Image (cartoon, rainbow, N blue to C red):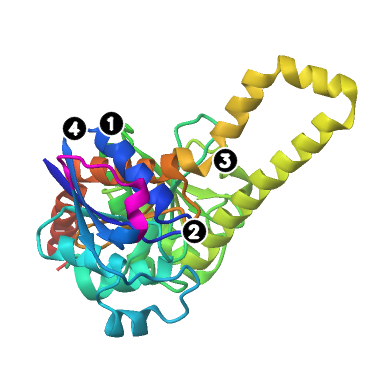
Amino acid sequence: MIRLAVDGMGGDNAPAEIVKGTLMALEKFDNIEITLFGDKEKMAPYLKAHPRLEVVHTPYFLEMGEKDPIKQYRTHKEASMFMAMQHVKDGKAEAVVSAGPTQALVVGGHFIIRRMPAMKRVAICPVIPSYDGRGRLLLDSGANVEFKPEHLLDFAVYATIMAEKVLKRDKPTLGLINIGTEDGKGRDFDKETFALLKASSDVNFVGNIEPKEVFTTEADILLSDGFTANIVMKTMEGTAKGMGMLLKREIKATFLSKIGALFMKKALYKFKKSLDASEIGGALIMGLDGVVIKAQGASQAYGFYNGIRQAKEMVEANVISLVSEVLSKKEVSEE
């Protein structure tokens, strides 16, 4: 049985959508047990008794606009997010899922769950939409702004194992986000990272990838520093939203376009679904000694359910142990 800890009070739509998504996951998967942390009184209208659900009460939680998560950790360890993470640290669960503030989740990961011994940094790794519908891993999407090239190599190894074991990609490929596809492009940092990736036998590196290729590339993993990848991710989100608004405007523009939209209803639904973040669920906080999934802050029930699904799949694939084994061997060989 896979044991999961859920922050019931994190997110813009907590606790209603979080509780509903949790119950949805329990009905869908018969191999998970969930401990839900939050205010029982506030969650009560949405809760239903379930043999594999335990509710732990705490009246404290983190607001989405939290500015000082380190202070909150030091003064409010009883917050639902931190209690859920402590549950994992104490060995009572294998993964935690929260839609709460990202930086608080990163802070809690550092102070409570801690980094894997073989990882010197953490990264945020979401699955982003792709033209073929299979999705791509994008990292680091904002955990850190500055890295050393060797940190990105560690992330590349981790993401390769995740793509193979969780996304079921055969010999997953990896590209480095850069301003041009030619060798030697970019900052000194990019050039050094390129050289390390090219020399590594642990990743299948296919070279530089320009941001314009992010949605259509065949590479399974897209790698960069937290500043660059975060801009790429938010640009994709904004473009998708803008395209949807333009499409809606044009459909409403004339009577004939409205009639045409009726005939294209199925295609338009598939178009919307292919760009819908709720189909993915959330992002892995990569590099911690436990599975931590950051669900979308605006998650509805279905989106949060998919975050729980992600956590379950990460535990089932035993990704953290596999990554530790590969990176430990790499360190030995380098010595």
Residue 312 image point, x, y percent: 24, 42
Badge 2: few (under 14), some or many (20 or more) residues near its Cα, within 10 Å?
many
Report the residue at 29% width, 52% height from top: 157
Report the residue at 35% width, 38% height from top: 172
Is 138 drawn above or below residue 247 in the view shown? below
Magenta highlight range: 42-53
Does 308 appear in magenta?
no
Is 285 drawn above or below residue 246 in the view shown? below
Please state which amino acid type lies under the numbered disc 4: Asp
Is 6 drawn above or below residue 57 in the view shown? above
Viewer-closest of 38 and 115: 38
Q: Which mark is residue 28?
A: 1
> Mark 4 touching mark 1, by CB under 8 A?
no
Q: Which residue is mark 3?
A: 215
Viewer-closest of 40 and 142: 40
Of all residues, the one furthest to the right in this rendering is: 254
Please state which amino acid type lies under the numbered disc 2: Asp
Does 47 appear in magenta?
yes
Q: Which mark is residue 12?
A: 2
Disc 4/disc 1 C-alpha distance (Å):
7 Å
Disc 1/disc 3 C-alpha distance (Å):
30 Å
N-term mark: 2 or 3 = 2
Q: Which mark is residue 30?
A: 4
Report the residue at 37% width, 41% height from top: 306
Residue 307 seen in the current view? no
Disc 4/disc 2 C-alpha distance (Å):
28 Å
Which quadrant does the C terminus fall into? bottom left
